[in-house]
Image: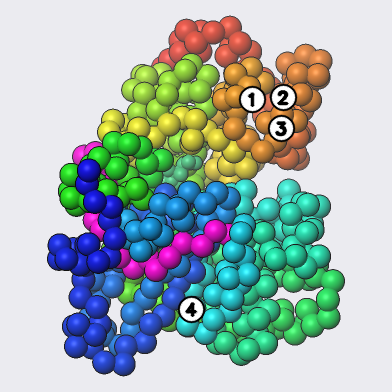
């Protein structure tokens, strides 16, 4: 039996960087990042950047530490806490460079059970950044995306004053306490795949504060305005769920059992707006880019990579392809993705300076074909009701505005609708799955059925008035109903 990873054991093996004391550094200031939604992505991306930045930093006056917070289950806390916060990231596929031990995490709190401790940490003056990777649904935004959804029972319960269970509730309670204590400035850094993620998070926080029943909300809003920043960011790395194989690979490299090991493709990118009033790690030393073109980067990544992911995952789910790699190996599906990029996304997208759109698309397709990654269509295709709007909405709107029929983006929507209506029930992972299927199937005729699913999901409401969009989505759904082969040959026919 291999011993479990822990700080004393890793120190003995020489796997840990020297502590400041041991390195002879006096009076170092320890600063903290509280990371809400400490799942596999956060560990293989954001926390890894902090680790590498700290290892390469030449500034001995500061040390950055991370406390992770889980949103739903305790699994990550159970994996990491017995290992004193240590875990490793396993590089997977072409270009892979091995296994990196991450040592900058102090502990993982369980958001649902320890929310008072989470609030206290957010309010602590040593905390300078609250990072979020809570996925699209974690924000609990209203359908228009202009703030939190006050009809959400969890938000209502948080507003009424319980120990907060939602991420936005925890942030606001933390800010309230910070404000009372005058604990100094803070950056709230959303790292989720939403366009304008910083602005959306600011609006979520502000709308939550405005909805609070107590006094003092005006003052708190002014405090947030003065001392809290919400930088926009674009994050990119494909991180599948860890498997037994990940744990084995980590064990081979470390000589320890690491139950918290996470896999990630070799490619990684992070573009950030530089607005951190309480300071930040030198993430640029780990390869992050500080830029004032974050919006272009976010749009490019969402509308190319994430939209392609959604297209391939939906098609893959319809034909029973288990992974993204399996889906992109199908000639028809790879063609559909290329055509969507070439005809619908690139002509309507403002690229960041110096980026070649066609080459970007080819690189993305190459990354999708990473056969060691095992990124499942089930995972990528989950939560479609929340992912489709940010990934495909802009492309569809802009094409329609120019009189172009976005048939490839509509294929992504059609395949998703088909899966929602006719996939095996247990395979449709979406908070609205049951409602979308029930109401979709109750509607009479293909057209009403499709528009009912989209209506329940709150997708493309105003666009559906334009017959063209509904027509082309319904056309694909009809083809999907006739079978996989008909689908493949229709895609090939239309792309020739
Ligand atoms: C994926 C993303 O699961 C999904 O929805 O599209 O997690 C994707 O892998 C990352 O955004 C890549 O940076």
Nearer to the camera, 455 or 136: 136
SS for dot 1: helix
Q: CA distance from mark 3 to mark 1?
A: 11 Å
Q: Quadrant of the C terminus?
A: top left
Disc 3 target residue: 454
Which span is picked out in magenta?
90-111
Mark in front: 1 vs 4: 4
Crowding at mark 1 (Cα within 10 Å: few <14, some 14-19, many 20+): many
Q: Earlier in the sequence, mark 2 or mark 4?
A: 4
Q: Which residue is mark 1?
A: 420
CB atoms of marks 3 and 1 within 8 Å: no
* CB within 8 Å, label 1 to label 2: yes
The residue indicated by pointer 4 is 128
Q: Quadrant of residue 86?
A: bottom left
The earlier-in-sequence mark between 1 and 4 is 4
Query: From the Cβ of disc 2, is ligand 1 less than 8 Å away?
Result: no
Magenta span contains residue 92: yes
Above or below: residue 62 compared with residue 488: below
Q: How far separated are the C-alphas under marks 3 and 4?
A: 40 Å
The residue singled out by tag 2 in the image is 437
**Render colour scheme:** rainbow
Q: Is residue 282 magenta?
A: no
Rendered residue at 58%/79% (across/down): 123
Give the mark toward the camera: 3 or 2. Answer: 2
């Amino acid at each position: 039996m291999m011993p479990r990873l822990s700080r004393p054991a890793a120190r003995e093996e020489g796997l840990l960087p020297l502590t400041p004391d041991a390195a002879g550094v006096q009076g170092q200031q320890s600063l903290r990042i509280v990371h809400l939604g400490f799942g596999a992505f956060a560990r293989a991306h954001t926390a890894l950047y902090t680790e590498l930045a700290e290892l390469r930093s030449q500034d001995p006056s500061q040390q950055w530490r991370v406390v992770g917070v889980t949103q739903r289950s305790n699994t990550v806390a159970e994996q990491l806490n017995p290992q004193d916060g240590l875990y490793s990231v396993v590089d997977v596929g072409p270009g892979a460079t091995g296994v990196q031990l991450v040592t900058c995490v102090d502990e993982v709190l369980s958001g649902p059970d320890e929310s008072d401790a989470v609030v206290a940490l957010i309010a602590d003056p040593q905390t300078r950044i609250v990072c979020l990777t809570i996925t699209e649904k974690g924000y609990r935004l209203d359908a228009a995306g202009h703030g939190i959804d006050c009809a959400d029972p969890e938000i209502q319960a948080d507003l009424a004053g319980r120990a907060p269970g939602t991420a936005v509730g925890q942030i606001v309670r933390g800010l309230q306490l910070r404000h009372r204590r005058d604990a100094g400035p803070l950056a709230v850094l959303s790292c989720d795949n939403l366009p304008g993620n910083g602005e959306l998070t600011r609006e979520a926080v502000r709308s939550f504060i405005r909805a609070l029943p107590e006094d003092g909300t005006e003052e708190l809003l002014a405090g947030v305005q003065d001392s809290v920043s919400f930088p926009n960011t674009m994050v990119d790395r494909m991180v599948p769920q860890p498997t037994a194989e990940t744990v084995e690979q980590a064990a081979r490299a470390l000589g320890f059992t690491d139950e918290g090991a996470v896999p990630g493709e070799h490619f990684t990118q992070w573009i950030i707006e530089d607005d951190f009033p309480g300071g930040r790690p030198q993430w640029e030393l780990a390869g992050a880019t500080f830029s004032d073109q974050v919006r272009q980067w976010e749009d490019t990544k969402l509308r190319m990579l994430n939209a392609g992911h959604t297209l391939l995952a939906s098609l893959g789910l319809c034909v029973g392809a288990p992974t993204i790699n399996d889906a992109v190996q199908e000639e028809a599906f790879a063609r559909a993705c290329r055509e969507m990029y070439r005809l619908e996304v690139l002509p309507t997208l403002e690229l960041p300076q110096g980026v070649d759109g066609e080459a970007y698309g080819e690189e993305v397709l190459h990354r999708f074909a990473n056969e060691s990654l095992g990124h499942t269509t089930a995972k990528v295709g989950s939560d479609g009701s929340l992912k489709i709007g940010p990934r495909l909405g802009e492309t569809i709107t802009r094409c329609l505005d120019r009189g172009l029929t976005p048939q490839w983006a509509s294929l992504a929507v059609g395949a998703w609708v088909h899966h929602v209506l006719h996939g095996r029930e247990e395979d449709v992972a979406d908070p609205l799955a049951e409602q979308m299927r029930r109401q979709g199937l109750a509607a009479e005729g293909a057209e009403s059925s499709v528009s009912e699913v989209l209506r329940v999901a709150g997708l493309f409401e105003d666009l559906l008035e334009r017959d063209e969009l509904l027509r082309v989505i319904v056309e694909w759904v009809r083809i999907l109903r006739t079978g996989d082969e008909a689908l493949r040959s229709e895609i090939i026919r239309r792309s020739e």
